[in-house]
Amino acid sequence: MRLLRIVPDNTKFDFMRFRRISFPVSAILSIVAIALFFFHGLNFGIDFVGGTLMEVQTKAGPADLSKMRTTIGSLHLGDFQLQQFGAPDDVLIRISEQPGGDVAQQAAVQKVRDALGDGVDYRRVEVVGPSVSNELLAYGTIGLVLAIFAILIYLWFRFEWQFALGAMIANVHDLVLTVGFMSLTHIDFDLTSIAALLTILGYSLNDTVVIYDRIREMLRRYKRLPMPDLLNASVNATLSRSIVTHVTVAMSLLALLLFGGQAIHSFTATMMFGVVLVGTYTSVFIASPILIYLGVGVGRMGGAEEPDSPPTVPSATPAKPSPPAQRARARR
Amino acid sequence: MLFFTRWKAVAILLTALAVCLCAVPSFFPESMVKNWPSWAQRHVVLGLDLQGGSHLLLEVDSGAVRKEQLQSINDDVLRVLRAARVPFTGRAIRGNGVEVHITRDTDYDTALSKLRELSQPLSGLAGTTGQRNIDITQNGGVITLTPSDAAVTERVRQAVDQSIEIIQRRINQLGLVEPTVEREGTNRIIVQVPGLQDPTRLKALLGQTAKLDFRMVDMSMTPEQAQDAHPSDSEVLDGEAPGEKYLIEKRVLVSGADLVDAQPGFDQRTNQPVVNFRFNSSGARKFAEATQANVGKPFAIVLDNKVISAPVIREPILGGSGQISGSYTVQSANDLAILLRAGALPAPLTIIEERTVGPGLGQDSINAGEHAAYVGAALVIVFMFATYGLFGLFANIAVAVNVAMIFGVLSLLSATLTLPGIAGIVLTVGIAVDSNVLIYERIREEVRGGRTAINAIDAGFSRALATILDSNITTFIAAAVLFYIGTGPVRGFAVTLGVGILTTLFTAFTLTRLIVAYWVRLWRPRVVPI
């Protein structure tokens, strides 16, 4: 049977050429993302800033949001938000953290329950007091930093330090862009978002490690090949695998996004952005070229028992007269 | 890479089969599984976000525990110095310790040695060996006794253990389904009640310390006068009605610890709900003495430092039983009886986190999760088949076994499945395919490079497996960190992700290879159909 080939065999696309564009673009995007984080801010959920979240379903027909707003407003509980959540009879109420510690949160919940009375079903109630919210925020941040360091150490162990550093820069850049995305879209940032960020880190590294493995193999075999050519060869060789895997992961995420329901919507949207869009881009256009800048392969001058170039080498470097034998091999 | 001894092949298949079978109890309803033998009963537990229920996180008030210890030291200092006939002044609780000034310098050493006897070594649990429960310092003529941090921690730990018991007793009285009450950290308790939709009554029951005391009302002055005069043996307490105040003696006649039973009932005359209580023999005796000595005077029933009733003693109560009446409804009388029967909490508990999910949302989440899982799996299966043909079929089989094994491991661990956990499984399907893709793409490359079919397949496997290991380990580290810092649903995600990676590694290294190896052996292909 004719099999589906998204990526043709023996691609010779010159990826490394783009590094003069991709690096500045990435730098700018990162700065924009960081600026968004500081000035536009993240839509922190109650997990991190405390407060109360209630998902109520009105028993009799669609909810009257303005009436509910007045009712809750009259309780003088400070800032609160009311929005429709999915179906027209589904309302999400969010009340900011009450002054007065943990006890005050409970008091506020009781007031709202009393005020809304019997006309609503409580699908979900979440109350997070100041003690817990501070802890979750601390743990979340520490967790991210810890994961980055743990993986850095593991990569250092398995590859040379330039690889470890390159991978980390590329993937932290992933996280920065994803946080920028979350700030821009005002998506809920709670504990599941930290889960999404950590997973994005893991999967992005997945990709990067596959390419690095191939680069390492090529470094051993083709000792006289200039770095840009070698990197291009590695990326081209792994391109088919990358695309296929990204398609399958994207399919899984798409299914989750479309059918997984509102409860994990923010989680899957974040993952979709981080893994599919950004992860691919950084693995190819950042993680690989950065090795050039980190000085990988400088001073390699070994005897060439192996042929001077692998089959998939585009000419990234200006044309050099190459012996006919090489060209013949490349053409096979 | 393609060579499997018969034993190895059988071992792999049996392991995979065994783990998959472990998943079976999770897919049958609870009612059926209960009747199976005990070794076949381990199953996945649905998280609260999927089955609906209440999750409460309670914190023991360490400040209150420390205050109680200070009070106890304060009383002990008085007792010890009086027994040693050492005059002193200025005995008071100041800041974190009890201070006392010894009047005569000559008594100083005696006082110090007597007070030193109060300091006991702590029992050797977890890091407290060699430490004492009270630290004694001196400054000029003033001796300060401070409860050591280790002592406070130990007392908080004990308070948590006691509280867990009492909470369990209180919850059991409500007839709730399989509640979980567990310690978390040094001073917190998790209460999880599946199926509970409105935790208001539960929160009310857990929020009350329920310390019951019987004391005499101090009739020597009015409460207002006492607020200015500050008598040392009495204190002003609030009553039930707003603004109501009483002056109550500090001395406790009988305490709630001596209660042996409390039942809700109805007053014979007024038909109002009341709580009838009974003392044990020691409590009954104390109660009899107190009421005999104070006929005609009012005595106060104090619950959590609030006067809930202050009836006048008409006649001595010798039978050791009595009645608490007030503005109780049937339910509040029942609740008070529950609190009294279960016992008083050693320290106040604060609810610092609450997450309640109704059954409607729970069922919706399960449906959504299942739906997404089926659609995602279908998409991936079709895509793999279209891209790799026969080998795609092998990959799909491997992934199917992978998912079954994930459920098997989760069942063995009796792990909790949450909605993010289901998302984790769907993601694992996406990533499990990657290991197979790595192998197949490598095989394709080897074929292009000119190897024969079998050599290409062999080389594909050997070259790809190292990469598979490396790339999966990084995701595993992320999952491990997430498990450590996460709670509840997020932790469920970390667990399924981590387990998924392990099973993916197993199936990639063994199952896919096995299937391909046997196919090669049976078909002896010249061309690799990739």
Image (cartoon, rainbow, N blue to C red):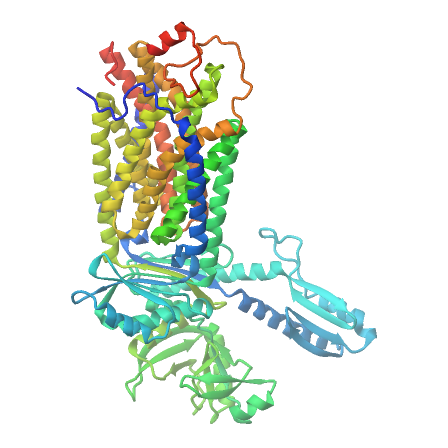
A122, above or below B409, in the image? below
Percent across and percent down for residue B355 are: 35, 59
- Residue A296 in sight in this render: yes
Percent across and percent down for residue B90 are: 71, 79
Percent across and percent down for residue A291 are: 49, 28
The residue located at (56%, 62%) in the rendering is: B155
In the rendered image, the residue lying farthest to the top is A325
Considering the image in quadrants, where does the N terminus of chain A appear? top left
Relative depth, front residue between B255 and A55: A55
Q: Is residue B236 left or right of residue B457?
A: right
B162, above or below B71, in the image? above
Marks counted in the figure total 0
The residue located at (34%, 84%) in the rendering is: B327
Relative depth, front residue between B203 and A15: A15
The quadrant holding residue B375 is top left
Q: Is residue B323 left or right of residue B72?
A: left
Percent across and percent down for residue B514 are: 30, 20
Considering the image in quadrants, where does the C terminus of chain A appear? top left
Q: Is residue B314 left or right of residue B383?
A: right
A285, above or below B45, in the image? above
- Residue A155 in sight in this render: no
Relative depth, front residue between A150 and B221: A150
The quadrant holding residue B396 is top left
B273, above or below B152, in the image? below
The residue located at (31%, 72%) in the rendering is: A72
